[in-house]
Amino acid sequence: MKLISSDIETYCIEHSTRPSQLAGALQKQTMDSVHGSQMLIGEMEASVLSFLIKIGRVKTILELGTYTGYSALIMAEQLPEDGKVITVDINPHTTKIAQDYWDKSPHGKKITLILKPGLEALNTLDEKFDLVFIDADKNNYLNYLKWSLEHLSDHGMIIVDNTLWSGKILEAGLDKQTDSIRAHNDFAAALDGYTKTLLPIRDGMFLITRT
């Protein structure tokens, strides 16, 4: 399901701050040769993430779902020198591509990879984050959100990707993943003490922060 036309999205990207050439090369390699390249966040979402990191004065980021490391890299590029990204994934092959590119970037030193299942990795972390970016296994979205709410800094935000799920989100009972995202969205919408907005950008970005 295409929420906006390709021409409009391209126009928006061309008039936005772009990621580095290295991030662009990683995006191209992923799209050209890596299975599941639709999982990339894309330049439009990368621009929104970068903007939010800057205006939120973010220093610490937790990412659930690394894939080939594009999102981790574009986020690290926006952080101050003492900022950090902890990113979690279970795939040693795609994260090897990620590490190769991070090693080429002056911002790569800000990124730490945890190669474990999401919930197992979260059990090893006990700190607060300025930004949590959730883009991993959809069936655990609600579990990831509940953990993130407990580990969010006072001025922090949570961003959850794929929350429109190609439009399937409008119909209950399609499949387990769709119902899991619907449950997450309903829980998030009902949160007291938080300001939320579900943006129809790319495949849906749900933004959550304390009121």
Image (cartoon, rainbow, N blue to C red):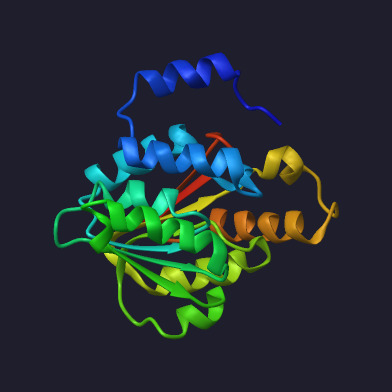
Q: Residue at x 46, y 78 (%)?
A: 122
Give residue 48's position: percent from left, percent from top: 38, 37
- Residue 54 quadrant: top left
Task: Give the vertical position of 46 relative to 154 (above or below).
Answer: above
* Residue at the image point whose x is 41% and y is 24% from the top: 13
User: In the drawing, does residue 171 fall left or right of residue 191?
Assistant: right
Image check: 102 left or right of 203?
Answer: left
Query: Can I make out residue 5 in this image?
Result: yes
Q: Residue at x 54, y 59 (%)?
A: 94
Q: What is the quadrant of residue 19 in the picture?
A: top left
At 26% across and 47% down in the image, what residue appears? Answer: 77
Q: Determine whether, in the image, residue 127 is placed left or right of residue 2.
A: left
Direction bottom: furthest residue: 124
* Residue 102 pos. (x, y %): 33, 56
Point out the image quarter for the C terminus: bottom left
Q: For this rendering, which residue is in front, 171 or 32?
A: 32
- Residue 146, percent from left and from top: 51, 71
Residue 103 image point, x, y percent: 30, 58
Q: Relative to 28, does residue 191 appear above or below in the rendering?
A: below
Nearer to the camera, 43 or 100: 100
Image quarter (top left, top right, bottom left or bottom right) of the N terminus: top right
For the question of whether residue 191 can be seen, the reply is no
